[in-house]
Image: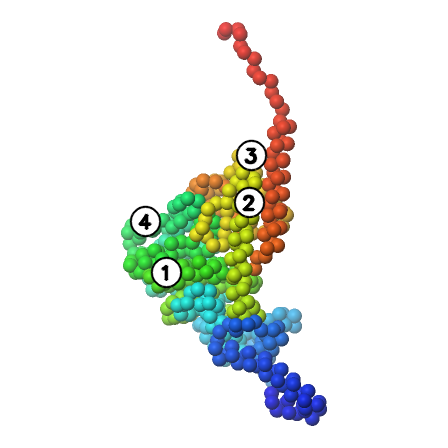
Amino acid sequence: MNSENFSLSEKIVSTSYVRQGSQARRSHEQLIRLLLEQGKCPEEGWSESTVELFLSELAVMDSNNFLGNCGVGEREGRVASSLVARRHYRLIHGIGRSGDIAAVQPKAAGSSLLNKLTNSVVLDILKLSGVRSVASCFVVPLATGMSLTLCFLTLRHRRPKARYIIWPRIDQKSCFKAMITAGFEPVVVENVLEGDELRTDLEAVERKIEELGAENILCVHSTTSCFAPRVPDRLEELSILCAKQNIPHIVNNAYGVQSSKCMHLIQQGARVGRIDAFVQSLDKNFMVPVGGAIIAGFDESFVQEISQMYPGRASASPSLDVLITLLTLGASGYKKLLSERKEIYLLLAQELKSLASAHGERLLHTPHNPISLAMSLDGLQAESDGAVTQLGSMLFTRQVSGARVIPLGKEQTISGHMFRGFMSHSDAYPCPYLNAASAVGITREDVTLCMKRLEKCLKTLKKEKKVAKSSSPVLPPCQEDTTGE
């Protein structure tokens, strides 16, 4: 209520009670005022009542919620189901206009304000997470792969003759298909094995640039967050190379916001060389439903160019989800989650190392990967060719999600390109292995339960193999031939 309505309320209810209610209302409004004034994630998280009040205030600014609205167009924010309307807090118009996803909608001042504030709050979080010189970003209602495609399509207008994208190999389908979908030819650069780690082959990247010609290369497409034993690309060196050769550089930072190391690599790459844009997932970094990503960069005009490439209006759901989440957590709450993730990474590494040792395996040494870990499965492979794959099935049926079991020699064809040793980021990685990751939101209970079930699976497999061997028929030894023939 406004001040006039509070005054009128005093004629109905005791003045002292009404004033107390008015003061409580002002405490909510003060938080909203600071958000509008600063455009930053609040240090302390908001209560649900403040968040809902704020969203309600935004919703009544959209034309579909005007009490006297008379809609005669084809897009009037009509919703048949009240359940759907409540799910979206009656913010129905989405974001952007037909020509620009970042544009303000005349019919939807509230949704437009939501969009602008979300981008501003997310930019603040990217800076807080380590990329302090990032200039601009926007939330796009596309997952990481399609968001990368949008970046490549934008670069097409700047480099119309280019047809190749140089891509240090990472065995993840969507980032490969992103280049194909955009109409470009991926040039796969195999990684080099350094100890247990798979790292960027910088010399091979340079050779490819010389071979193809810098003017024919759209960009270098590098990666930060990845499954061990692959580790983040050598971003600083790649950025220097891109700056020297005048080649754009797009970074797939899918779940890297939660890692200070990944964010530091991006910050350093931009400082010493060239990074045009970096893309990260909303669900992996902020624990919201799948369907959104953040496209960010160090040149505001280029980020705006990418946003203008998006055709038509867009769903506001990803923006709404991440704004609600960050307002609820606050900057301190998000930083706490990041700190807890680091602590549990160390716990997971310790527990996995102990378990591996107990079963004659070892934790692969991948110090440059700050999120993912890998445990060898050499002994299991020696037991039986199918034992490694069977372990993966056993873990899945025992509700251990996210653990990846990588056998040797798997082949996979994606859009006509055949990958040998698929999922291991290498044609011939030396051993089969199991992946586990410490991602934001993981708990100590997750680690404890995973280790317990993994150990049980390993014991079961070894027991089954022993039984199978002991039950095999034993043939009598061949007798010596004494015929002399």
Q: Are marks 3 and 1 in contact (CB under 8 Å)?
A: no
Q: Amino acid at mark 2?
A: Ser
Mark 2: which secondary structure? helix
Disc 4 to disc 1, C-alpha distance:
18 Å
Q: Amino acid at mark 4?
A: Glu
Disc 3 to disc 1, C-alpha distance:
45 Å
Name the front one of labels 2 and 4.
Answer: 2
Name the residue beneath numbered marker 2.
Answer: 354
Mark 4: which secondary structure? helix
- Decide which of tag 3 and tag 1 comes sooner along the chain: 1
Q: Are marks 3 and 4 in contact (CB under 8 Å)?
A: no
Mark 3: which secondary structure? helix
Label 4 Cα neighbours within 10 Å, binned few <14 / some 14-19 / many ≥20: few
Q: Quadrant of residue 214?
A: bottom left
Name the residue beneath numbered marker 4.
Answer: 203
The quadrant of the rendering that contains the N terminus is: bottom right
- Decide which of tag 4 and tag 1 comes sooner along the chain: 4
Disc 2 to disc 3, C-alpha distance:
21 Å
Q: Amino acid at mark 1?
A: Gly
Residue 303 screen position, x and y as percent: 40, 68
Name the residue beneath numbered marker 3.
Answer: 383
